Image (cartoon, helix red, strand yellow):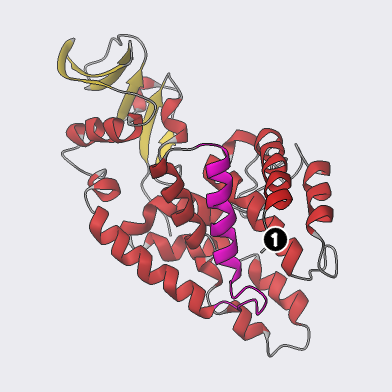
């Protein structure tokens, strides 16, 4: 499925961490952009957003149409509101104005994911539930805002939507370990295509598609590397791998690793598979958690 991506010129680079990379394309030339975000006054006839002195200004023909002060906590929503004004509420109404419906649809899909997953008899949690649990704990450890913690939990619950039914199919295969992994390579693409058909869930597409990308570009499906990989996908990707390693036998390591062995693996692969800064923070978090709490 293909999209006509909206072209953005952003000299501040701030929006790259906030907007869905599969809906927007960043261009180096202001003349080809549909959206202009800058930290200086631009010589352009286009309406654009000026970032200056902790204010977002909507500028047209060198006149301020709208001014909004922002903080790190509300920057994203203010930016999206200004973009909505430029585009007459589209496409940005899809990201915030359908919030109630988004929550309703997301809850249904999350329940469906858990229903179809194999539950661990020891702790009565599925893979998705454990990833969401540790994502929330990790975010709390990093002292994220309450809204951001809720978002990462939500994204973690949706990250494997493309795998619905795969485990059940593989239970009847004689070579289920290898077949599961072969099918599993498709779940990121399958999941992002599924979400593309539900406008209310587009906000999760980055994580669903990119949580198996690796820092060095050897992941899948798009071979993104480094900061090209969306931050939330890098975040959940580490926890996703950790949970698989400690609960599932794969051809990568045959057998289930202990938490300590998995921590060593993450540490060895900092800057290779995993974001070196985020990966180190995860190691510090999980060591601290395991020193106080029971492993799930």
Can residue 226 be seen at all in this image of the molecule? yes
Task: Give the secondary structure at mark 1.
Answer: loop
Residue that appears at 26% across and 45% down: 91
258 and 79: which is toward the camera: 258
Q: Quadrant of residue 69?
A: top left
Q: Which residues are magenta?
A: 117-143
Q: Tell which of 192 and 249 is nearer to you.
A: 249
- 136 to the left or right of 95: right
Q: Is residue 5 part of the magenta span, yes or no?
A: no
Look at the image and say whether residue 125 sits in the magenta stretch. Answer: yes
Residue 237 shown left or right of residue 254 in the figure: left
Identify the residue at image location x=34%, y=24%. Answer: 71
Residue 294 in the image: state x and y as whole percent.
69, 60
Image quarter (top left, top right, bottom left or bottom right) of the C terminus:
bottom right
- Residue 10, by quadrant, is top left
Question: Looking at the image, which residue is at 71% across and 70% down?
Answer: 181
Location of residue 154 by image quarter: bottom left
Q: Is residue 117 left or right of residue 3?
A: right
The residue labelled by disc 1 is 295
Asked if 56 appears above or below 210 in the picture, the reply is: above
Q: Position of residue 253 (x, y in %)?
A: 85, 63
Q: Is residue 212 left or right of residue 251?
A: left
The spot of residue 177 in percent (x, y) is 76, 76
Residue 5 screen position, x and y as percent: 38, 43
Q: Residues within 10 Å of mark 1 (few under 14, many from 20)?
A: few
């Amino acid at each position: 499925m293909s999209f006509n991506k909206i072209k953005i010129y952003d000299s501040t680079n701030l929006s790259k961490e906030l907007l869905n990379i599969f809906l927007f394309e960043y261009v180096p030339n202001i003349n080809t952009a549909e959206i202009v975000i800058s930290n200086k006054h631009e010589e352009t006839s286009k309406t654009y957003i000026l970032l200056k002195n902790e204010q977002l200004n909507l500028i047209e023909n060198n006149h301020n149409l709208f001014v909004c002060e922002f903080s790190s906590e509300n920057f994203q929503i203010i930016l999206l509101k200004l973009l909505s004004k430029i585009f007459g509420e589209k496409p940005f109404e899809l990201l915030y104005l359908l919030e109630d419906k988004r929550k309703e649809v997301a809850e249904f899909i999350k329940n469906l994911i858990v229903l179809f997953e194999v539950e661990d008899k020891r702790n009565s949690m599925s893979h998705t539930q454990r990833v969401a649990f540790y994502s929330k704990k990790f975010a709390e450890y990093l002292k994220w805002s309450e809204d951001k913690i809720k978002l990462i939990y939500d994204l973690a619950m949706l990250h494997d939507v493309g795998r619905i039914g795969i485990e059940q199919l593989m239970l009847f295969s004689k070579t289920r370990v290898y077949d599961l992994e072969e099918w599993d390579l498709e779940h990121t693409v399958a999941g992002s295509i599924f979400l593309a058909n539900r406008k209310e869930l587009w906000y999760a597409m980055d994580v669903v598609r990119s949580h198996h990308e690796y820092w060095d570009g050897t992941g899948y499906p798009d071979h993104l590397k480094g900061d090209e990989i969306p931050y939330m996908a890098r975040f959940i990707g580490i926890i996703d791998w950790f949970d698989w390693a400690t609960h599932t036998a794969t051809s990568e390591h045959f057998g289930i690793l202990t938490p300590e062995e998995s921590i060593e693996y993450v540490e060895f692969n900092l800057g290779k598979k995993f974001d070196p800064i985020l990966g180190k923070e995860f190691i510090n978090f999980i060591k601290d958690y395991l020193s106080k709490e029971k492993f799930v």
